[in-house]
Image (tube, grey):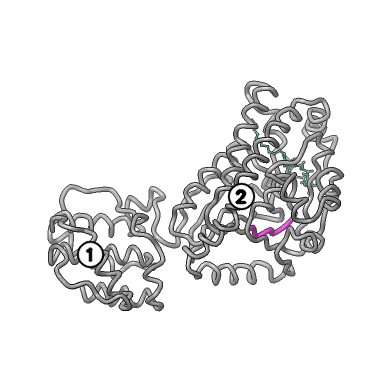
Amino acid sequence: MAAVTLRRARCWCPSLLQVFRFPVAQVHLGRPTMRASQQDFENAMNQVKLLKQDPGNQVKLKLYALYKQATDGPCNVPKPGVFDLVNKAKWEAWNSLGNLPKETARQNYVDLVSSLSPSSEASSQGKRGADEKVQESKDIVVTSEDGITKIMLNRPAKKNALTFEMYKEIILTLKNASTDNSAIAVFTGAGDYYCSGNDLTNFTSAAGGMEEAANQGAVVLREFVNSFIDFPKPLVAVVNGPAVGIAVTLLGLFDAVYASDKATFHTPFSHLGQSPEACSSYTFPKMMGSAKATEMLLFGKKLTAREAWAQGLVSEVFPDSTFEKEVWTRLRAYAKLPPNSMRISKELIRNNEKEKLHAVNAEECTTLKARWLSEECINAIMNFVSRKAKL
Ligand SMILES: CCCCCCCCCC/C=C\CC(=O)SCCNC(=O)CCNC(=O)[C@H](O)C(C)(C)COP(=O)(O)OP(=O)(O)OC[C@H]1O[C@@H](n2cnc3c(N)ncnc32)[C@H](O)[C@@H]1OP(=O)(O)O
């Protein structure tokens, strides 16, 4: 039976080196059931053969280890040589189970397989195998496929404007994505817009009035931006259409920004009586020089995708007709690169700036809180809400 399981594992894993991609700690063991019988164990082994999607190398290693422990007991073979990478990884996975009793290993194997099955309870609760929807809410759809956590803003009727709930969901999503088994995370928008920025009704619909909304808003905004500053994996924006306000400023904290030639980049803060956020008062002048940053952040100059590329805000612009195909093909290839190496390289780059970015974020939030209570800002929001003004 073990031989069958491993043959299957090999066909999931054309590149043997991929075995090393994910740390063992990320394996989800599912809900414990009562006590697995030999029959449950055999059923689980059969179920493994029927899995439609590759569960990932780390899960396969865990399955192998639990199988060996359940059938042979504690690891009793010599450690393979340092260059025998695959057998060494298998040996280490098995050996890491120490003296785990055979019955417990059998139970854990059954639980693990059940957590991988699409029809299992674990899956219907939104828990994670590979290539599946990992979180769904009305306005944000998070999927995990091909090593990519895709976070799609999904409020196309409102141009993907960010509600208070969406800020909180994104904080949570980034937290999850920082430890899931994806190599990179990608933001994009559903429909014709990437995102029209902060939902301007966030303030008018807040229960406790403007002052309470401003206090809450500053706390949430600070945490929201911090979650981008601290995100440990490559973070990519797939800008499918116009971006406004905070959807633009945040791009300065992304590692790569790919834009359709239909995208535009607009930060109308002065028009709204507001001030820049998401560390853009620091990242934009650094990226494009203060003269160009001033045009955007003070005068609200809207940039085309090519202009944004020329200013260093966008990594590459694609024709809209081939945008999705070209970008996702490229991202799937990037997601196959060694994830630890990418993370460590990002850490080296980001660590030079982290302290500064946190300080800038704190200051921008304090400034914005005061702005939100200013007459200039309140008038601008009221004008939008009463349909007197649009960008
Ligand atoms: C407790 C409170 C906590 C809040 C948390 C605080 C965090 C704050 C973060 C930072 C603050 C500000 C940064 C910014 O993002 S500033 C930028 C804000 N965005 C805008 O000013 C854009 C406003 N929208 C427009 O000007 C236009 O809608 C458009 C984007 C140019 C598109 O024009 P269009 O003619 O093509 O489409 P339109 O009919 O106007 O839009 C379709 C519907 O979508 C609604 N909508 C679009 N954008 C927003 C938005 N940002 N906020 C709210 N609603 C938006 C629009 O009203 C239409 O709705 P409806 O069909 O009429 O119902």
Instruction: Specify the quadrant of the image occupied by residue 224.
Output: top right
Residue at 58% x, 57% y is 235
Name the quadrant of the N terminus: bottom left
Q: Magenta part mainly helix, strand or loop?
A: strand
Q: Count residues near mark 2 (Cα–Cα under 10 Å), then give few for <14, some for 14-19, many for 20+.
A: many
Q: Secondary structure at mark 1?
A: helix
Q: Amino acid at mark 2?
A: Asn
Residue with the mark numbered 2: 154
Q: How far across and down, in percent of the image, does residue 165 sit?
A: 58, 37
Residue with the mark numbered 1: 94
Q: Residue at x 62, y 41 (%)?
A: 358
Left or right of 191 in this view: 92: left
Q: Determine whether 161 is above or below 376 in the image.
A: below
Quarter of the image with the C terminus is: top right
Residue 85 image position (x, y, % from top left): 33, 75
Residue at 49 percent of width and 65 percent of height: 341
For residue 217, which quarter of the picture? Answer: top right
The yes-or-no answer for disc 2 within 8 Å of ligand 1 is no
Cβ(mark 1) to ligand 1 < 8 Å? no
Which amino acid does the dot numbered 1 rest on? Trp
Using the image as rendered, state which of residue 231 and residue 390 is in the foreground: 231
Give residue 50's mark. none
Work out whether residue 225 or residue 38 is closer to the camera in this orientation and state it: 225
Q: Ligand 1 lies in which image quarter?
A: top right
Position of residue 322 measured from the top left corner of the image (x, y, whole percent): 69, 71
- Is 193 on the left or on the right of 43, as rendered? right
Task: State yes or no: discs 1 and 2 in contact (Cβ < 8 Å).
Answer: no
Classify mark 1: residues with Cα within 10 Å, few (<14), some (14-19) or many (20+). Answer: many
The residue tagged with tag 2: helix, strand or loop?
loop
Horizontal relation, residue 102 to residue 365: left or right: left
Task: Pick whichever of labels 1 and 2 is earlier in the sequence.
Answer: 1
Find the magenta span and give its range. 237-241
